[in-house]
Image (cartoon, grey):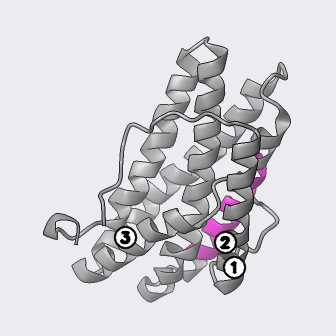
Amino acid sequence: MAGGQLLDVTQEIKLDHDNVRELFDRYKATSDAKKKRAIANTLIREMAIHSDAEEVSVYNDYATVGLSDVATHNKEDHAEVKKLVYAADSHGFDKPDYDDVLAKAVTAFDAHAREEETDQHPTLRQKLSAEDNNRIARAFLKARTMVPSRPHPWAPQTGGIAQKAAGAQGKLHDKVVETLTDRDFVDVKYTHPEF
């Protein structure tokens, strides 16, 4: 355990949500093009990682707490968010409407995030034992290290083995693309615990 403490999956998920919100605030606050591009790259990476990590870990446990329909709804939301994040990733930073394309992705991500925080997380905290909550939180953190760092909206969204296999291939592909295109990133404000 991280420092002997039990983790809360809802807090780890919200940390990602807060990073996306904070990054977008930074993006809107700067006029430095190089910094904006690095922040945009980081936003895209964070939204992509977060969505896939939830799908291959957290949502698989929703049925045990009576939220299987919610998991299906969340995956549908994620599919839409991934399409918008993909559009931002492929649109071209230098195009005049890039800010609008990125804003659509962040707005969709944030709408889904607020629904999770308001409607779903209280139920999870109530229905999960401390041990199950910790187990799911750790699975989520592990999944964050294994999923692609860029959006792949046409990859399987099942949360099962097909998505994990596609994710492994996508992660390698993303590393090559990020290296070849010399993408810069910024640090996120909030960090997950070591586990």
Q: Amino acid at mark 2?
A: Ala
Residue appearing at x 63%, y 54% in the figure: 149
User: In this figure, what is the number of numbered marks?
Assistant: 3
Disc 3 or 2, which lies upstream in sequence?
3
How far apart marks 3 and 1 lie (CA) works out to 21 Å
Specify few, some or many for label 1: CA neighbours under 10 Å numbering under 14, 14-19, or 20 or more.
some
Residue holding disc 1: 165
Using the image as rendered, state which of residue 135 and residue 109 is in the foreground: 135
The magenta segment: 70-85
How far apart marks 3 and 2 lie (CA) works out to 21 Å
Q: Position of residue 29 (x, y in %)?
A: 53, 16
Write down the quadrant of residue 195 in the picture.
bottom left
Residue appearing at x 36%, y 66% in the figure: 9
Q: Position of residue 187 (x, y in %)?
A: 45, 36
Q: Quadrant of the N terminus?
A: bottom left
Judge whether residue 80 is colored magenta: yes
Residue 107 in sight: no
Q: Position of residue 157 (x, y in %)?
A: 71, 73
Is disc 3 placed on a helix, strand or loop? helix
Relative to 141, is 33 above or below? above
Q: Amino acid at mark 3?
A: Ala
Disc 3 or 1, which lies upstream in sequence?
3
Residue appearing at x 70%, y 66% in the figure: 76
Tell me the chief SS of the magenta region: helix
